[in-house]
């Protein structure tokens, strides 16, 4: 029954905190992240981090990216291929290079310094997706470029990680990892084209309650699961499943009901659980390093991705907004950090510091996006009234 009580507290607190955040001129997701810190062990201890809560949170982020996929304009997505590539690649090169330099200055070995740079190169746009929705940027050129860049970023970082682990002497078969990625994306596209419409068509006339919505969720969860098996983030699989459904005649019905399911319980749990994971242990002893790495993590991703967007001919304000959306490291960086801890490429002390840094990048992303995209909106408004 403790879980039931915690869910009630999370839902109540996240909705109230989100509303307060909006009234203060910030995206609601910022309030949900901060209330998670307050509810969690770091402050009040009302909600604890449990395996069940983590599983519910995972469903939340999968549904969030599934919804984002259904909202994606594939024609715009195709047109933004160059922009997505430039944003994704530049958003890796700059953090990787400067992260490596920082590791070198911290007296790390070459492999350890490269690992730190790679960790800083990771991106998780699950938080950014919610901010894009609230800013009505989800289907814009900027939103499409961000989502495309996230897919490219995820694949390149995982491949680079595999290459680095093989250099470090780990038992990693790089060619097999590349093959798994190719097979996954090839199979995912083929199934999206041929199988998904057929499955939905067969489920639609079934004489059971909400058969079509169930079919959509089955497709979403299977894509997420297979993506994880292939070494691609589950959220990328869920996003591809959403884009597959966006091409069918059943898109609107599935979208509306999945959005209701997701935002009524699972998505708020996801946002709040990020804050619940926060721990301030070692904060005072390592505050200088935490601040330094946080600034490094924010600026390298912001500048790198923004330069890529600028090369793709976005305005400076839009480019900075795109760069801001790529700042959040989220669960992808935490997975990489865990691998580094297991293989002894980073110490336990540095792991704890990096967890706090990841949390900071996640919290600052929504207000940064709001600031830069608001500046761009104001600029366009001034032009239209001139």
Image (cartoon, rainbow, N blue to C red):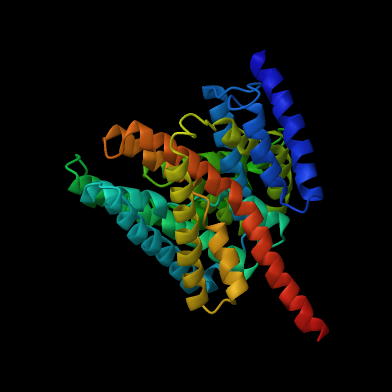
At 36% from the left and 53% from the top, the residue drawn is 157
Q: Is residue 211 visible?
A: no
Query: Where does residue 196 sit, x and y in percent of width and height?
Result: 54, 50
On screen, residue 260 versus residue 277, left or right, reads right
Q: Is residue 45 above or below residue 149?
A: above
The number of numbered discs placed on residues in the rendered structure image is 0
On screen, residue 91 versus residue 367, left or right, reads left
Give the farthest residue toward the bottom.
386
Q: Is residue 55 above or below residue 368?
A: above
Give the farthest residue toward the top.
1
Q: Quadrant of the N terminus?
A: top right
Query: Where does residue 99 sit, x and y in percent of width and height?
Result: 35, 55
At 41% from the left and 52% from the top, the residue drawn is 120
On screen, residue 196 versus residue 88, left or right, reads right
At 25% from the left and 49% from the top, the residue drawn is 164
Residue placed most toward the observer, 32 or 88 = 32
Q: Is residue 357 above or below residue 49?
A: below
Q: Quadrant of the C terminus?
A: bottom right
Query: Where does residue 170 sit, x and y in percent of width and height?
Result: 20, 40
On screen, residue 243 versus residue 233, left or right, reads right
At 71% from the left and 35% from the top, the residue drawn is 207
Q: Is residue 164 visible?
A: yes
Query: Where does residue 39 sit, x and y in percent of width and height?
Result: 66, 27
């Amino acid at each position: 029954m403790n879980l039931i009580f915690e869910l009630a507290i999370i839902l109540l607190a996240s909705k109230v905190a989100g509303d307060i955040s909006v009234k203060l001129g910030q995206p609601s997701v910022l309030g949900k992240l901060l209330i998670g810190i307050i509810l969690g062990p770091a402050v009040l201890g009302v909600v604890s981090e449990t395996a069940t809560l983590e599983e519910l949170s995972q469903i939340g982020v999968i549904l969030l990216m599934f919804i984002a996929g259904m909202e994606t304009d594939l024609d715009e997505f195709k047109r933004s291929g160059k922009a997505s590539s430039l944003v994704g690649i530049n958003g890796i090169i700059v953090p990787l290079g400067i992260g490596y330099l920082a590791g070198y200055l911290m007296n790390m070995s070459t492999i350890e310094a490269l690992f730190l740079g790679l960790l800083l190169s990771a991106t998780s746009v699950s938080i950014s997706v919610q901010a894009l929705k609230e800013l009505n940027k989800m289907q814009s050129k900027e939103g499409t470029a961000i989502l495309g860049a996230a897919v490219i970023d995820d694949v390149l970082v995982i491949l680079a990680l595999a290459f680095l682990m093989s250099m470090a002497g780990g038992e990693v078969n790089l060619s097999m990892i590349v093959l798994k990625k190719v097979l996954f994306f090839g199979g995912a596209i083929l199934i999206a084209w041929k199988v998904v419409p057929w499955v939905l068509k067969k489920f639609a006339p079934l004489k059971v309650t909400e058969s079509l919505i169930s079919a959509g969720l089955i497709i979403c969860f299977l894509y997420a699961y297979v993506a994880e098996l292939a070494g691609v983030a589950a959220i990328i699989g869920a996003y591809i499943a959403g884009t597959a459904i966006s091409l069918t005649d059943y898109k609107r019905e599935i979208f509306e009901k999945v959005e209701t399911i997701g935002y009524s319980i699972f998505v708020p749990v996801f946002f709040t659980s990020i804050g619940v994971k926060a721990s301030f242990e070692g904060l005072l002893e390592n505050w200088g390093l935490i601040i330094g790495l946080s600034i490094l993590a924010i600026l390298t991703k912001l500048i790198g991705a923004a330069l890529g967007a600028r090369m793709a001919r976005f305005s400076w304000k839009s480019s900075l907004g795109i760069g801001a959306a790529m700042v959040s490291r989220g669960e992808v960086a935490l997975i990489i950090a865990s691998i580094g801890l297991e293989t002894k490429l980073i110490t336990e002390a540095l792991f704890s510091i990096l967890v706090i840094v990841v949390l900071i990048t996640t919290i600052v992303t929504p207000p940064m996006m709001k600031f830069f995209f608001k500046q761009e909106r104001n600029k366009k408004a001034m032009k239209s009234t001139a």
